[in-house]
Amino acid sequence: MVFPETFFESETRDGFTISSMMKRAWAAELEVLGAFHDLCEAHGFRYYFAYGSLLGVVRHGGYVPWDDDIDLWMFREDMMRMNALPDSEFASRGLVLINSHHEEGNVNLAWRVDNGRWVNLSPEHLMRYHLCPFATGVDIHALDTVPSDPEAEHRQDVLIATANTLSRTWEDPSQPEAEKKKTLRWLEEEIGAHPDEGMPVRQRLMILSDLAMALYTEENSNLVAFLPSKQKSRTQLYERAWFGEPVYMPFEGFIVPVPERYNLLLTRIFGADYMNPRHSGGMHGYPFYRKQYDAIKQLFEEQGEILPEFLSEA
């Protein structure tokens, strides 16, 4: 991707100052998005901009100034097809798929596609990602069917909550071992799946959580949601028809796909006045690269070296 040099300059938008390093991180995320888009095109996967990223497209024509990531939606069926691809399909594009199916310690309910797993100061990486050494990419949130039958919805919620709670407490010695194993067996029977017993138990539980979210299909309902969010608030419940054929709109000088009825989704998520900017901090601790930056800084200090100028701006 080609960016004008002015793109990387620090600037103030809507009263919020965006640093030069954050601009480089944005550019790195857009590079990952471009490679991810090519993968989706090659395999017929559909995705849409989501949440604050969708708001940024519609309201700002780019990032919300105080945002630092890209959120996407994908329907579960495409996500599972993507999950079945060999690692080489991602690696050939400089990408890595990060989720509980692939990683023992991953307990995140959203998936990620990144350009690496940690800081990379190699010349090749810095050239490709506009002097952004940090691992970054896109967050992918599954759109799963919410059954119209209240009893079925409650059952699904219980299965997801049980799998996630058991994953968090599995290594807690205060919890009876026999009771935990009994609950695990119950989950497997209810969901109708038995992940490989050679996997660590917490990884098996996170996979069971994913499978519980995917229990129902569009034959059961016209409602969809990223279920972890729906369990917190029913404002995160959407009609499948709102997504439809992607509409392409400008985002930081590029064209990206958004849901067909994006206005209804933004109203549901942010309220009818979503076009009125309201400053807020990043959800994940702004900036997202703080831990990675601190690790680089400590390494340079331990070696008695001075940080490169482009890193001193972080």
Image (spheres, rainbow, N blue to C red):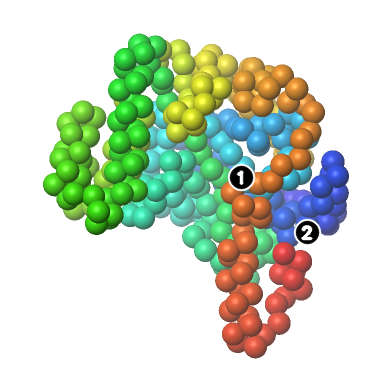
Q: Amino acid at mark 1?
A: Met
Q: Residue 263 location, x and y as percent?
A: 68, 19
Is 30 positioned to the left or the right of 163 in the image? Answer: right
Snapshot quadrant of residue 57: top right
Snapshot quadrant of residue 299: bottom right
Number of other residues with Cα within 10 Å of mark 2, as a class: few under 14, some 14 to 19, many 20 or more: some
| Label at residue 62 | none
Residue sitting nearer the eye, 125 or 145: 145
* In this view, 149 is above or below 175: above
Q: Residue at x 77, y 30 (%)?
A: 59
Of tags 2 and 1, which is closer to the observer? 1
Q: Which residue is mark 2?
A: 20
Count of numbered circles on the image: 2
Return the disc, 2 or 1, that comes first in the chain's sequence.
2
* In this view, 27 is above or below 294: above
Q: Residue 29 location, x and y as percent?
A: 63, 49
Q: Secondary structure at mark 2?
A: helix
Q: Secondary structure at mark 1?
A: loop
Q: Amino acid at mark 2?
A: Ser
* C-alpha span from label 2 to label 1: 20 Å
Q: Residue 178 location, x and y as percent?
A: 13, 47
Q: Residue at x 65, y 59 (%)?
A: 129
- Residue 247 visible in the picture: no
* In this view, 152 is above or below 293: above
Q: Residue at x 33, y 54 (%)?
A: 104
Number of other residues with Cα within 10 Å of mark 1, as a class: few under 14, some 14 to 19, many 20 or more: few
Q: Residue 314 location, x and y as percent?
A: 72, 64
Residue sitting nearer the eye, 109 or 46: 109
| Label at residue 283 | 1
* In this view, 293 is above or below 88: below
Q: Which residue of the protein is positioned furthest toward the front in this rendering? A: 174
Marks 2/1 in contact by CB < 8 Å: the verdict is no
